[in-house]
Structure formats: structure tokens, C-alpha cells
Amino acid sequence: MTEFSSTEERVAYYLKQMDKAMPEIKRQIKVYEEAVKSSKRKKSEITITRNV
């Protein structure tokens, strides 16, 4: 684990890590939103079967 001598260094480090991760997070959010928009809202049918 990285040791920090000050809070400012720690905050700068985590902000840099977040900047690296944000493009992928935004891409995943976009994919999720498109999937929600394209899905058709229909009632799911449940079929009950009996295995004998």
C-alpha cells in the first residue's frame, strides 16, 4: 500500500486514480442506459412445470 506524508498527496493520488477509471465507468453507464431504453416493457410470463 502506498504511504502518504500528507492529506494533499493522498487526495491527489486518489483523484488521479479516479480520472483513470472514469472513462470506463462512463462507458458502462452508457451501455446500461442504452439497454434500458431498448428493452421492451412486457410482463414476464411464468410457466410452472412439474418434473416427475
Image (tube, rainbow, N blue to C red):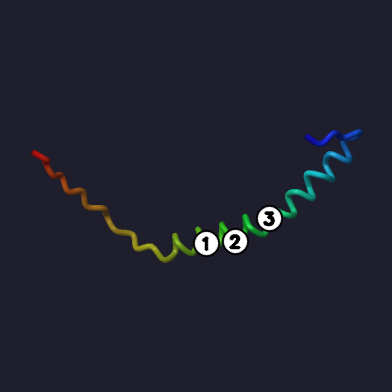
Residue position for label 2: 27
Q: Identify which residue, 52 or 16, lies in the foreground.
A: 52
Residue farthest along the right direction in this orientation: 5
Quick one: SS at disc 1? Answer: helix
Q: CA distance from mark 2 to mark 1?
A: 6 Å
- Disc 2 to disc 3, C-alpha distance: 8 Å
Give the spatial CA distance, label 3 vs label 1: 14 Å
Circle 1 residues within 10 Å: few <14, some 14–19, many ≥20: few
Task: Specify whether 24 is left or right of 16.
Answer: left
Write down the residue under mark 3. 22
Quarter of the figure with residue 3: top right
Position of the C terminus, as image quadrant, is top left
**Residue 33 x/y as whole percent:** 50, 60
The residue pinned by badge 1 equals 31
Count all numbered tags in the image, as a single digit.
3
Q: Residue at x 49, y 64 (%)?
A: 34
Sequence-wise, the earlier of marks 3 and 1 is 3
- Which residue is nearer to you in this view: 40 or 23? 23
12 and 33: which is toward the camera: 12
Secondary structure type for disc 3: helix
As shown in the figure, which amino acid type bears the numbered disc 3?
A: Met
Q: Is there a contact, CB below 8 Å, between mark 2 and mark 1? A: yes
Q: Amino acid at mark 1?
A: Val
Q: Helix or strand or loop: what does disc 2 sit on?
A: helix
Q: Amino acid at mark 2?
A: Arg
Picture coordinates of residue 15, whole percent (x, y): 79, 48
Which of the two discs, 2 and 3, labels the residue nearer the N terminus? 3
The residue lying at 73 percent from left, 50 percent from top is 18
Q: Residues within 10 Å of mark 3 (few under 14, many from 20)?
A: few
Query: Answer yes or no: do the residues labelled 2 and 3 have beta carbons within 8 Å?
Result: no
